[in-house]
Image: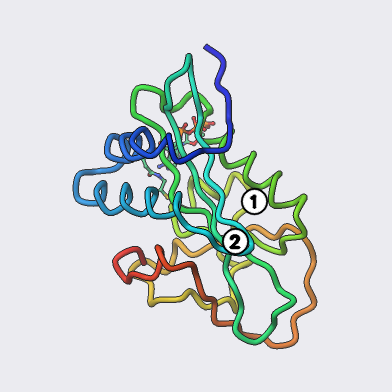
Amino acid sequence: MPVQIRPATADDRDDIRAVHLGAFPESEAHLVAKLAADLLSETSEPETISWVAECDGEVVGHMAVSPLTADIDRAWRGYILAPLGVVPAHQARGIGTKLVQNGIDVLSQRSIHALFVYGDPRYYGAFGFSAASAIGFLPPYELEQPIGWQARMLRPFVASERTFRLSCVAPLRDPAYW
Ligand SMILES: CC(C)(COP(=O)(O)OP(=O)(O)OC[C@H]1O[C@@H](n2cnc3c(N)ncnc32)[C@H](O)[C@@H]1OP(=O)(O)O)[C@@H](O)C(=O)NCCC(=O)NCCS
């Protein structure tokens, strides 16, 4: 069955929550489902964007991106990818890949310099994310697993400083996510 990626709407809230409650281990699932639902209502500028993957009319995957700002350079424009989930019955069929690639494509067309992620390097490395690209960009909170902090450069940026402290949208301002 072909998979379609489309922007999420408020009507998708319950389906999106269900995706993450099914995809993540029980210890994290409620936190991630809450984040996904909160990001759906976020009215940041630039915009927070959520997409769903639909298969035969059923929502089987979800991904959101939200803006990051750098404390000392307002010209810099970044985003963070979180969360990403695909329901177990539909995993390993390329749906996660489609969601990530679509997000990279959309942000690349919007003059965004870098997309960050805090996740498994074995998964995200295939999309061009690396820890090396994230050096100098300090996450908003201390990380429990620093090895997961990665960035995918989308366009060149000549930095005015060597170190930037990043700020995130309100739904991500909880140390439990980091
Ligand atoms: C991670 C996740 C989103 C991937 O979605 P998916 O639709 O199964 O991914 P794809 O089918 O596009 O897989 C792409 C490749 O990544 C691999 N892969 C999947 N999950 C992986 C993981 N956790 N670590 C390493 N590789 C992984 C697949 O084997 C596949 O490899 P291949 O192309 O060589 O066969 C999905 O497995 C999921 O929801 N997991 C639970 C939640 C989670 O961990 N989210 C990410 C948090 S950072």
Identify the image's colour scheme: rainbow, by chain, secondary structure or one colour: rainbow
Crowd band around label 1 with a 10 angstrom C-alpha radius: few (<14), some (14–19), many (20+)? few
Crowd band around label 2 with a 10 angstrom C-alpha radius: few (<14), some (14–19), many (20+)? many
- Circle nearer the viewer, 2 or 1: 2
Q: Secondary structure at mark 1?
A: loop
Disc 1 target residue: 128
Residue 111 percent coordinates (x, y): 77, 59
Number of marks present in the image shown: 2
Query: Measuring 49% from the left and 65% from the top, which residue is drawn there?
Result: 149
Query: Measuring 30% from the left and 42% from the top, which residue is drawn there?
Result: 24
146 vs 43: above or below: below
Residue that sits furthest to the left in the current view? 27
| Quadrant of the frame with the C terminus | bottom left
176 vs 26: above or below: below
Disc 2 target residue: 79
User: Which residue occupies the foreground of this view, 168 or 86?
Assistant: 168
